[in-house]
Amino acid sequence: MGTFFSDTFGVDPSVLEKYGAFDVSLINDLPLFIDPFLLFHSENDEYQALHRQIIDYLVFLRERAMQGPLSDGDLTNWYCFPEVKQNWFGFSLVGNGGSGLGINFARELHANLHVVFVNFGEEKITEGSHLEKVCLVSNGVGRDNISDFVTNLIQDFLCQYTERFATQFVDARHLREVMISRAVFNYTTQTWQRKAYKLPWIRGDFVLLTPRAMLTRDDTWINRADLLGRFDEIPTAIPDSALRAAVSNYFDLALRQRANPRKPPTQKDKSSAAATDY
């Protein structure tokens, strides 16, 4: 039984590297995290689409929050974000189990979104009137929680990304069709849709690959000689407080822009801009 994806499934590590995927450990979680800013700042069209997908869902949550109280069932469906443990990232010392973002997070996120955006687009903006009030980026929420949130919202991409690689490079006897219950959010029915994928399977569960370009690392947890070389190209994560502030500020800007999209420039605006240029 191998330690990493490559030796477990008999794949040359250079093939994984060429594909852009991280060669994940299948023994215990590694201190790696999907950083939303690596999506937001990417010039990759597919990553930009994922960025828009995340903002779309936040807009949906904001609109639901503005409509008033929700049942625990709705909170569970829309606001709870379980850890997607099959990517093998996080702070678990043994295995890949984690807590994710449960019902308490859901209640606080819904309540705070409602308060912050009750007069969305009309309220007087103050320094405190932004998403740092929201539980998603409050004290106690760290890079692992933010990574869980993002991973849930891009799970369909990660499953397709893994499926493309696995069907080409992993022996078919190690693959299994897996039904993912929260794969794609349907805004018409306002429910999560199930979707089937053919994914690598080991010890009674599937495995997900993640592009290295999406990841940051926590150096304080990486001290084993056999791991150091695998992390060379992955940037170090910024402290939790800095990441919370950055995510707060960005989501605040993005949601306000979505609520008050800029009008297309008039001919007068264009003429004025042209005159300024010359």
Image: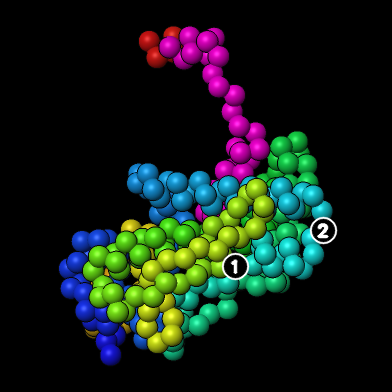
Which quadrant is home to the N terminus? Answer: bottom left
In the image, what residue occupies the spot 45% across and 46% down? 49
Which quadrant is home to the C terminus? Answer: top left
Q: Tag 2, which secondary structure?
A: loop
Q: Which mark is residue 154?
A: none
Q: Foreground residue, 146 or 154? A: 154
Q: Amino acid at mark 1?
A: Phe
* In this picture, residue 19 sits left or right of residue 208: left
Q: CA distance from mark 2 to mark 1?
A: 19 Å
User: In the rendered image of this protein, does residue 48 appear above or below residue 172?
Assistant: above
Q: Foreground residue, 219 or 18? A: 18
Residue 251 location in percent, x, y? 58, 49
Residue 16 location in percent, x, y? 24, 67
Q: Amino acid at mark 2?
A: Pro
In the image, what residue occupies the spot 73% across and 59% down? 110
Total of numbered circles in the picture?
2
Q: Which mark is residue 69?
A: 2
- Within 10 Å of disc 2 (Cα), the crowding (few <14, some 14-19, many 20+) is some
User: In the rendered image of this protein, does residue 5 appear above or below residue 190?
Assistant: below
* In this picture, residue 135 sits left or right of residue 88: right
Q: Tag 1, which secondary structure?
A: loop
Segment colored magenta:
245-274
> Where is mark 1, residue-wise?
81
In the image, what residue occupies the spot 28% across and 74% down? 172
- Dot 2 or dot 1: first in sequence order is 2
Residue 80 location in percent, x, y? 64, 67
* In this picture, residue 119 sits left or right of residue 203: right
Can residue 88 be seen?
A: no
Q: In the displayed orientation, state which residue is furthest to the right.
A: 69
Residue 142 location in percent, x, y? 54, 69
Task: Report which quarter residue 79 is drawn in.
Answer: bottom right
